Image: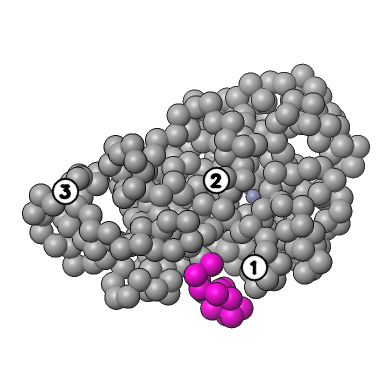
Amino acid sequence: MIIPSEFAAEAFVFRGDRLVPERISVKNGAIVPGDPGYPEAGFRLAVFPDCLNAHTHCADFRMKIPPGLPLEELVAPPDGLKHRYLRDTSAGIIGSSMREFRRISLSSGSVSFIDFRENGAEGCRLLRENAPEAIILGRPASPEFDPEEMEKILEYADGIGLSSISDVPGRYLDDIADFVRSKHSVLAIHASERIREDIGRVLSLDPAFVVHMCEAEKSDIAECADSDVPIAVCPGSNAYFGKTPPLAEMFSCGASVALGTDNGMLRAPDLASEASLLMDIIKKQNCDPGQVFGVFTALNGKILNHKIRISHSIQRRVMAVPFEGEPLPGNIFCRSSHGISLKPQNRSDRNGV
Ligand SMILES: [Zn+2]
C-alpha cells in the first residue's frame, strides 16, 4: 500500500482497552492539528501509541539460515549456528545490522525494542552505540559467574536477558539472579520454548517477564499470572520451529501477554505484521479477538519506568496500521498488515494523537 505524503483519514485510536474514532491529518509522517484539507486517503488507520517490541535479537538480522535446521542447532548457546555467526562476524557488520534493524523497527512504528543481547559487555556496548533507545538485556559470555563482567554489562545494558534455565548451570543462574537483585536491576529469561521447564525454578529468579512458554502447561501459565510475570510471545519465530504459544490458556489465566518479533534472522521487527500471525492463533484457539490490541503495550506500565528506568530518550511515536472496512481485529491485522510510524502532535493534554 502506498502512503501519500499528505492525507486525511478516519482513524481509530487505541485508548486503554478500546478503539476511539478520531479524524487525523498527516503530513510527511507527522500528525498535524486541525483540518488542512488534505486529500482523503483510500484507507482507514488503526493507531496504537507507544508500542514496544517485547522481544528481539537484532544482531543476527543479516544472518542467512539454511532451511530445516532444528531450534537447538540454530540458537542454543554456546555453539548453535547463530552463536558461531555472532562470534565470527566483524563488529562493523554486526553494527550495521543493528542500525538497519533499528531503522525498520522505528519506521514500522515501535518506540523501542527489548533486545536480548548476546556477546557479553561488548555486545551491549555495540547495541547502545547503534541503537541508543534500545532496551538492552545483556547476557554474560564468561563460562563461570564473573561479577566484573556483570558490572561491565550493566554499564551499557538495562538488565540481563538469559537463554533458559536448561542452558545455564543452576549455581550460575542463582549467582546472576542474586547479583541482579543486589543492583535493583531486572532479569528476563526464555522459558519452555522447546521443552517444558520447571516454572517454579524460573520464577525463583524473579524475572521481570518470561519469553515464549510454548510448551508450558496451564498450571505454569497460571503461576506466571499469579506472580504478575508477563509473557512475551513471538508467533513468527515459534511457527518457524513448529511451535505455537498457548494463547487461549494465557488469556484465560489472566496473564499479561506481550508481543515480540524475536530473532532478526527470522522476522523483521514490524509488530503489525507479527500481530497478524497472532490473530491467526487467536482465531484457531477461539480467543477473544480484541485481545490482540493489548499486546503492544502490555509491558509498558509493568516494566518501563517501573522496573526498567529509562535513562535514554525514547521519542514518542504511534504505530498506524492502514486497513479497509470495519475497525475489527481481523480487518486491521491480516496477512498484508504492516505498521507505519507517525509522529504524534505535541500536545500536553494527551487527548488525541
Ligand atoms: Zn529470544
What amino acid does circle 3 point to? Gly
Q: Which residue is mark 1?
A: 251
Where is residue 90, by image quadrant? top right
> Viewer-proximal residue, 242 or 307?
307
Numbered tag placed on residue 300 in the rendering:
2
Give the CA distance from mark 1 to mark 3: 39 Å
Q: Position of residue 20 (x, y in %)?
A: 35, 62
What amino acid does circle 1 point to? Phe
Numbered tag placed on residue 34 in the rendering:
3
> Viewer-proximal residue, 282 or 327?
327
Extreme residue in the right direction: 171
Residue for point 59% across, 67% down:
239
Q: Position of residue 15 (x, y in %)?
A: 42, 56
Q: Residue 230 in magenta?
A: no
Residue for point 70% across, 44% down:
208
**Which structural element holds mark 3?**
loop
Please provide the residue range marked out in magenta.
Answer: 278-291
Q: Tell me the mark number nearer the camera, choosing from 1 and 3.
A: 3
> Viewer-proximal residue, 12 or 219?
12
Q: Position of residue 161 (x, y in %)?
A: 69, 40
